[in-house]
Amino acid sequence: MALPASAQTDGITPRPASRRRSRAKPKPPRARAVILAELRGLGGLILEQALLDASASPLDSLLEWANRLAAELNVGGVGSPEDYRQLLRAIVEVNKRAEALGADAETIALPQAA
């Protein structure tokens, strides 16, 4: 059974062009309590790593995470400590500085990586 001429193609099926629906608008800042809770969770992870090997150099992703949270809280970051022991102390200092600012301090919206 043959297809009608209008349904026959030369083997190429046209596909609709995929459209990326990206909007370049900044996300609103997260609640300060949420950022502080995430910082405490990160501190727990760092504590576990410090208990396993306190003298090991911390992962770059953990340093980036801690510095990003500090930036969202508008306080100084952890920098680049040499080991997990120093990183844990730096996380505690970030938390102290953030708590000292109080709940009325503003958080900033950071651009999210795509």
Image: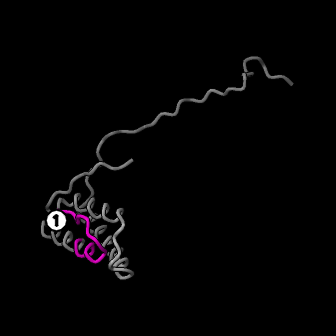
Residue pushed farthest top?
Answer: 5
Estimate how packed mark 1 is, as few (under 14), some (14 to 19) or many (20 or more) residues with alpha carbons within 10 Å: few
The residue singled out by tag 1 in the image is 103
Quarter occupied by residue 83: bottom left
Residue extending furthest bottom? 51
Residue at (25, 75) in percent of width and height: 86
Judge left or right: residue 94 versus residue 21. left
Q: Is residue 72 magenta?
A: no
Which part of the image, by quadrant, shows the N terminus?
A: top right
Residue 33, placed above or below residue 22: below
Looking at the picture, the colour scheme in use is: one colour
Three-letter amino acid code at disc 1? Ala
Residue sitting at 80 percent across and 22 percent down? 3
Of 34 and 24, the residue lying toward us: 24
Image x and y of residue 93, in percent: 19, 72
Q: Nearer the viewer, residue 101 or 75?
A: 75
Residue 70, x across and y down, in percent = 23, 62
As helix, strand or loop, the secondary structure at mark 1 comes to: loop
Residue 64 versus residue 19 in the image, above or below: below
Q: Is residue 24 left or right of residue 76?
A: right
Residue 89 included in the magenta stretch of the image:
yes
Q: Position of residue 8 (x, y in %)?
A: 75, 21
Q: Measured from the top left, where is residue 103 in percent x and y?
A: 16, 65
Q: Is residue 75 above or below residue 16?
A: below
Which of the 4 image quadrants contains residue 85? bottom left
Which portion, as a residue range, is magenta?
Answer: 76-90
Give the left or right position of residue 86, taking residue 14 as reference.
left
Q: Total of numbered circles in the picture?
A: 1
